[in-house]
Image (cartoon, helix red, strand yellow):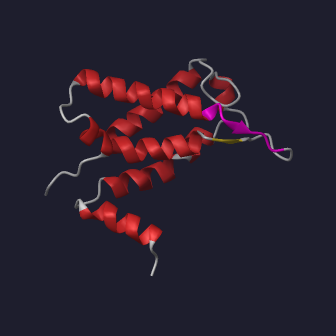
Amino acid sequence: MQACLTLGDVLIPRKTLLSDILLVLGASLFMALMARIALPLPFSPVPVTGQTFAVLLVGAVLGSRLGTLGVLAYIAEGAAGMPVFAGGGGFAYLLGPTGGRPAEASPGYGCVAACVEGPSQGELSRFSASVHFPQ
């Protein structure tokens, strides 16, 4: 079985531990910055943020292994009190009404990472073609 390449593998062909750490921290930073793009809804305490887009993009670019580490680093940073979420940070924030946002993006993230790391390299192109050109 041939291993599938993610976009991160193509951009950085010679992987080292340092490059993996930088990719994970970069993914975490990207998610934190995208969470700052928030559109408050007058009928809900939960704003619409760019965080969901960022989580899915990280899954597509880094794949399941590094992408999962990036999402876990993002959640750990927020739980530690860093203001990486749309409304701040801290463990108490994760228990509030918007605290489920990082966890609820996981199923979508898993689907994207699975499509990127499909059993063959043509899997993603078939998936992409089916999304863009339905029959």
Question: Where is residue 101, by image quadrant?
Answer: top right
Q: Residue at x 49, y 52 (%)?
A: 107
Q: Which residue is drawn at 53% across and 22% down?
A: 77
Q: Position of residue 44 (x, y in %)?
A: 81, 45
58 or 106: nearer the viewer: 58
Judge left or right: residue 63 versus residue 102. Answer: left
Report x, y in % for residue 103: 56, 42
Residue 82 x/y as whole percent: 59, 18
Residue 105 visible (yes or no): yes
Q: In this view, does 61 lie to the left or right of 48?
A: left
- Determine if residue 98 is in view: no
Q: Nearer the viewer, residue 68 or 10?
A: 10
Furthest-right residue in view? 42
Q: In this view, does 10 lie to the left or right of 103?
A: left
Q: Is residue 39 magenta?
A: yes
Question: Vertically, is 27 above or below 77?
Answer: below
Q: In which quarter of the image is the C terminus?
A: bottom left
Quarter that holds the N terminus: bottom left
Viewer-side residue, 47 vs 65:
47
The image shows a total of numbered marks equal to 0
Left of 119 or right of it: where is 21? Answer: right
Residue 44 on the magenta segment: no
Magenta residues, as a range?
Answer: 35-41
Q: Which residue lies furthest to the left in this view?
A: 1
The answer to whether 30 is drawn above or below residue 119 in the figure is above
**What residue do we see at 42% from left, 32% from top?**
70
The residue furthest bottom is 135
